[in-house]
Image (spheres, rainbow, N blue to C red):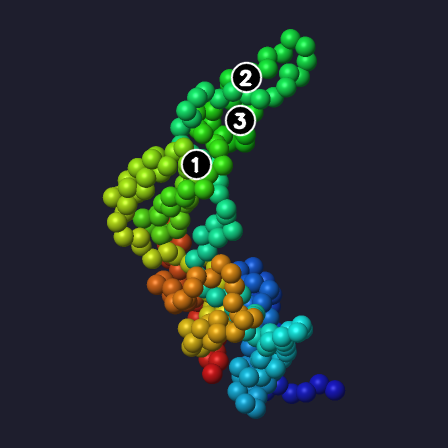
Amino acid sequence: MRTSDPAGNLARWAALTGRIYADRDLSPGGREVALALAWVLHREPQPPGGRWRRARELLGVTAGPFPQWRLWGALGEDLPYYDPGTWRSAGGECEGPRVRPYRSRREPAHAGALIHDYSGADAGPGRHPSVCGAHATICVTEYDPVTGWETPHWFCLRHKDRAREVRAQLAAALPDRPPPIPNRGGVLPRYFEADWAARYAAALQHPAGWRTPVPYGWQPPHHGLCRDDWPVPGQTTIPRRPRLAVVS
């Protein structure tokens, strides 16, 4: 038996869930939150206790010795912030100039072959024979003057003076780092109108909503909370999409 749907909520819910499933920008957790909110908005228009409470109930709790509401961890995956992608890095290859010419340590492949090949062909993928290439632990960070994104430059202890020179040059060229354009999260505001700054901050207050790359003392990004509002380097700003509903 079919039930009547005079308000067209079923069609709106189906269209919204289709967009959510097709959105590749959504993280797995963000998609869970979006689907739960779409349900309570269009299939349970007046849930007792409010829409956010009902969405929290739909997502349930995580298993383990210290169960947490799944909503907080899922919402934390959509937190908008800039991730430089280097938070796990423990070092890199030194970019300083080589003190001595490159000398291959390969064994000869056959009798009469040269043991030492100074061409640098086996110096490593992408490594120039005039570059040191040793394991480096001194990092000098370069900031893009437009996007604020980071580029790490690594130097070993033998090139610590070169690292100091590069750091001084970069500081003189760009005294103040511009606010970085976020590259993570910020997809849920694309679909729902809400006090997202408060919602994201609430998620970070719970252990389930904390993510290692998220900077300590997170604040709403300078460029906004919605991914659609962030400028795209080399392109025009993405137009803001219309909000579908208010989640209170």
Total labels drawn? 3
Report if the CB atoms under discs 3 and 1 are less than 8 Å apart.
no
Disc 1 is placed on an element classified as: loop
In terms of image quadrants, where is residue 153? Answer: top left
- Tag on residue 75? none
In space, the residues marked 3 and 2 are separated at their CA atoms by 10 Å
In space, the residues marked 3 and 1 are separated at their CA atoms by 17 Å
Report if the CB atoms under discs 2 and 1 are less than 8 Å apart.
no
**Residue 163, percent across and down?**
35, 38
**Residue 247, percent across and down?**
48, 80
Q: Is residue 248 above or below residue 216?
A: below
Seen from the viewer's position, the closer of residues 124 and 192 is 124
At 57% across and 88% down in the image, what residue appears? Answer: 47
Q: Which of marks 2 and 1 is nearer the N terminus?
A: 2
**Residue 180, percent across and down?**
37, 56
Q: Which of marks 3 and 2 is nearer the N terminus?
A: 2
Residue denoted by label 1: 156
At 40% across and 28% down in the image, what residue appears? Answer: 97
Q: Can residue 228 be seen in this view?
A: no
| Disc 1 residue crowd, few under 14, some 14–19, many 20+, Cα 10 Å | many
Seen from the viewer's position, the closer of residues 9 and 151 is 151
Name the outermost residue toward the right: 1
Question: Identity of the amino acid at label 1?
Answer: Cys
In terms of image quadrants, where is residue 38? Answer: bottom right
